[in-house]
Amino acid sequence: MLLTPPPWDDSHPSGYDVILKSDIDQWSPTFFIWRAPDDEPRRTVAADEHPPKCHRQVATLNRRCHRNATDFWQRRLWLMLLADKQCHPETSQPKCCRKLVAFRRRRLLTSLLVGGISVDARPPASMRAHLDAPAGTMAPTGTALGTPGIGTQSQSIYFQLAPVIARLYQFAAGFFLFLVALGFVEGGQLLVIPQDGSHWLSMRAVVEKLSEKGHEIVVLAPEVNLHLKESEHYTRKTYAVPYTQEELDRRLHLFANQPFDEVSFPTMIIEAYSSAMFVLDLFFYNCASLLQNREIIRYLEESKFDVLFIDPALPCGVILAEYLAIPSVYFFRGFPCNLEHAVTKCPDPVSYVPRCYTSYTDHMTFTQRVLNLFASSLETPLFKDLYTKYQDIASKLLQRDVHLPTLYRNGSIWLLRYDFVFEYPKPVMPNMVFIGGINCEERKNLSQEFESIVNASGEHGFVVFSLGSMVSEIPMKKAKQIAEAFGTIPQTVLWRYTGETPPNLANNTKLIKWLPQNDLLAHPKARAFITHGGSHGIYEGICNGVPMVLMPLFGDQMDNAKRIESRGAGVTLNVLEMTSKDLSDALNAVINDKSYKENIMRLSALHLDRPIHPLDLAVYWVEFVMRHKGAQHLRPAAHDLNWIQYHSLDVIAFLMAVVLVATFISLKCCLFCCRKCFRKKGRVKKAGKTKTT
């Protein structure tokens, strides 16, 4: 292996050549290498041979480690022992030489402290001139070039002992890192209560990252689920639920296909509400089964977890955090009724913060602000309708009356899966951390199957079409319209679809049961992305700079689509009302109109310009709560105030009373003065009349 440490200057300095041979699994300072004078040939000798006299000798040590026979981590430690012009620390040396000794010591200590990460051993400019002195000059102590105070025979012994010294450094560095690992990187115990479905997909990435850092993780999952499968990264603890896999699949299928039913608007609202409650009832049975399972509760009590990592979209984990008295970290996109702002006492003005399901921007007209205020007034009844029944099972477990919003306030950190490149700016609290784009990964190489499809698309490129993890088939009538639209564009279309093949499917359309969405969007030939408007897909489009055609179906997807459209990065279509021409026009617009590409690239640049990846940020805050047993310093005092105190109504009432009393006193004084004045005038007039008579 041929390795070269960082050069001191832009060009490799004369007399400074390093060639290194190292094994993979052990330290192997096998060779010493030097540059001989111009009149001598360059040689490489083994460490156990007697090295010839030379002007500069450099011993370089490399360490390359493997874990579990894989490249899980790799570190290199450069230890440079400069034999020529070595400044002896025990003799009187010039200032630059003393600096060089201190410099070497600092670099060596830094190398050990960072555990073998490559350290730039570039000394200051004042030392480089001293190191590059012409051959044959005298060292400051008056001896010939070489290690001051060490003769030729001593130098040979010195270099023969170099491997031993290097192995001592290895042992010292490893022992130091072992002590550091014991003292500062002790793994904690983490309990995870996720929300099944697409919510778990991004949460799983955080769990796997925490597992790699040495934490013991237990994931609570129902026996019947969609994506909560076993993994080497965590221990899965299951509990029984009163429904079967067939029942779960049937209800989710009805929920996913309800948006495609062509009915009147009032009927559509009623059906959407009914299908949503149909699925939420399953989640409630799920939560009730968990909280009533005494075996699971006993196991959780005995395990002594350090932190609870939960998706608070459903309050089961919030209730358990209160029961177990451990700090919790919330991880989710947001509540359907802006509950995260209400329970954290965060200001949420309706004048420029659009409410859920309104599809408004942050610049609203007067009519929109009126409707936004009306929608805000419905949030509390919606919360009660969705979550009141959880208060009953929480009261049974905690053996006291429970106010559910009060339990939510105990969350230490809120990890919110959005940022203000995508979301409209609004007030936030200090314990809110924004990790939008956490699901975006680096592009991986495509499989041979997909690579051949992409390459065959030619200069026109390709379009990716997916409606998320829950919708993989649609009614045939709508599928025919979509297939007809795809036949009008020159791009190749990769359509994630598991239903019956439309009879009018064009040759440029490929039906695929599963596709590597992020890897395809990261390909330079990706021209457009047709998506349902879920937060995962939208952020993959933003990260990779691909303009979008959005077909929102349910949930927050309408609001997500509006945010992308308002920024000029996509076009929104109503999946019920659109025709094949509408879809064709939308695709041609986002592909051929350069403004869409420019806008999405601007959003991508803003999103990617960050000091830390969202995944690492999420892991940091989970470990922060684990280390400090919560984050009480981020909890605002607003939680200790009642509604009257929070809005300062008592202060306003007091000030109004003061003003009223002051006004009353002032008025009384004025009236008193007026009466006094009029009485005096009346007396004067009477006196004048008496005199005239």
Image (cartoon, rainbow, N blue to C red):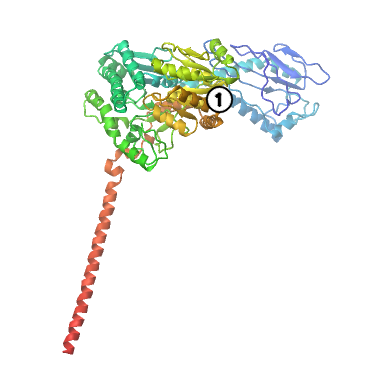
Query: Is residue 168 found left or right of 387 in the rendered image?
Result: right
Quadrant (top left/top right/bottom left/bottom right) for the N terminus? top right
Identity of the residue drawn at 22% across and 68% down: 671
Callout 1 amino acid: Leu
Residue 36 sits in which quadrant?
Answer: top right
Residue 656 sits in which quadrant?
Answer: bottom left
Identity of the residue drawn at 47% across and 27% down: 614
Does the image show residue 185? no
What SS does tag 1 mark?
helix
Query: Is residue 81 found left or right of 441 in the rendered image?
Result: right
**Which residue in the structure is indicated by mark 1?**
113
Query: Is residue 222 found left or right of 62 in the rendered image?
Result: left
Instruction: Between residue 110 and residue 605, name the one nearer to us.
Output: 605
Give percent across and percent down for residue 45. 73, 12
Using the image, determine if residue 5 lies above or below residue 67.
below
Identity of the residue drawn at 75% across and 22% down: 56
Instruction: Between residue 586 and residue 439, name the one nearer to us.
Output: 586
Give percent across and percent down for residue 454. 56, 15
